[in-house]
Amino acid sequence: MRKFILALALLPALAYAQMVTRDGVTLTPGQEARAEDIGSQLRCLVCQNESIEGSSADLAKQLRVIIRQHVVAGDSNKSIMDYMVQRYGIFVLLKPPFIPLTWALYASPFVGILLGFFGFWLVRRAKVEAPAPLSEADARRLDELLK
Amino acid sequence: MSPLRRRLLFGIPLAVVVVGGAGFYTILRRMQEDDYDPHALPSPLIGKKLPAFVLPGADGMQGFGNTDLAAPPKPMLVNWFASWCVPCLQEAPMLMKLAKSGLEIWGIAYQDQPGNLANFISANGNPYTRLAADVSGLTAINWGVYGVPETYLIDKQGIVRWRYAGALTDDVVSGTLLPLLQQYA
């Protein structure tokens, strides 16, 4: 019985062993995976082509802590993203949202394809027509020249 | 091949190269003249009031919070800096000059040690009427500060009108800041 109670008392420790600590915040592996997913979609403002998850800048570390605190508090991914956008603008999102400001950006591949087709059409149209067949005299002269 | 098509086939790539070249040339020239910074971000605070915060004073000076900036008597600057930041050192004489000209500047020391901060102020002068310390850096995150120095222009309604990330230079002050100060005076 004693042993059983001891085992029961130690059960929470088992759960704690499953927890991960990252940047000073302790959370479950599932929460950590969510935090990593969010952090990898956000741009580090210091090293601008790195994600918050991948950057070693101090600010990125602080933002990782904030993301994890929000995850532990049970906030949704969207509300955490909104928290960042509210402070740093849409530039913080590595994948830009589809808003009037980014329409040209999202349209650019299609514009490129259209321009390509236009160029292709120009070249196709530019094909020279076959010349009229040679006259008897010209054909004889050509044979003479090619001998 | 018709002359028009021939001209188009030759002219379109040429036009693309010319327009692209002119664009890149302009970008590089403006970057060289400190007129354009591709890393600079527009601040989402522009046109809004500051987020709620209260920061303690530093170096024996009075701290402040957002309510102290709700309605300044005239447009003023809030300058984020740190003793460990090299561009802040470069910017210090400019801040002194602006303060002497009568512009109100409040400072926030970002993640700084009291000793280092005191040394920095005594070595470079104190342009600040009030000086607060953001030791944790959490207020900076709420403002969207992503590096030091950063300078914010607050108008008489307490609304953020301009944010500049980087050291204030002669060009920035005469080209942007002074006209804005006049506009919001």
Image (cartoon, coloured by chain):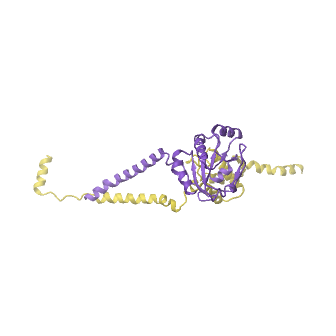
Chain colours: A yellow, B purple
Q: Is residue A31 left or right of residue B86?
A: right
The residue at the point 66 percent across, 55 percent down is B69
Residue drawn at x 69%, y 39% is B118
Q: Position of residue A92 (x, y in %)?
A: 58, 53
Residue A82 vs B25, above or below: the answer is: below
Viewer-proximal residue among A26 and B38: B38
Closer to us: A121 or B113: B113
Rendered image quadrant of residue B117:
top right
Quadrant showing the N terminus of chain B: bottom left
Residue B30: percent from left, percent from top:
46, 47
Extreme residue in the right direction: A1
Q: Residue at x 33, y 60 (%)?
A: A121
Q: Residue furthest left?
A: A137
The picture quadrant where one finds residue B100 is: top right
Most extreme residue toward the bottom is: A100
**Can residue A94 be seen in this snapshot?**
no
Between B148 and A119, the one nearer to me in the picture: B148
Q: Is residue A7 left or right of residue B162?
A: right
Residue A84, position as x, y percentages in the image: 63, 55
Report the quarter where the C terminus of chain B lies: bottom right
- Left or right, residue A3 beside residue B4: right
- Location of residue B94 in the rendering, given as x and y in whole percent from the top left corner: 57, 43
> Height in image: B107 above or below A108?
above
Total labels drawn: 0
* Residue B90 at least partly seen: yes
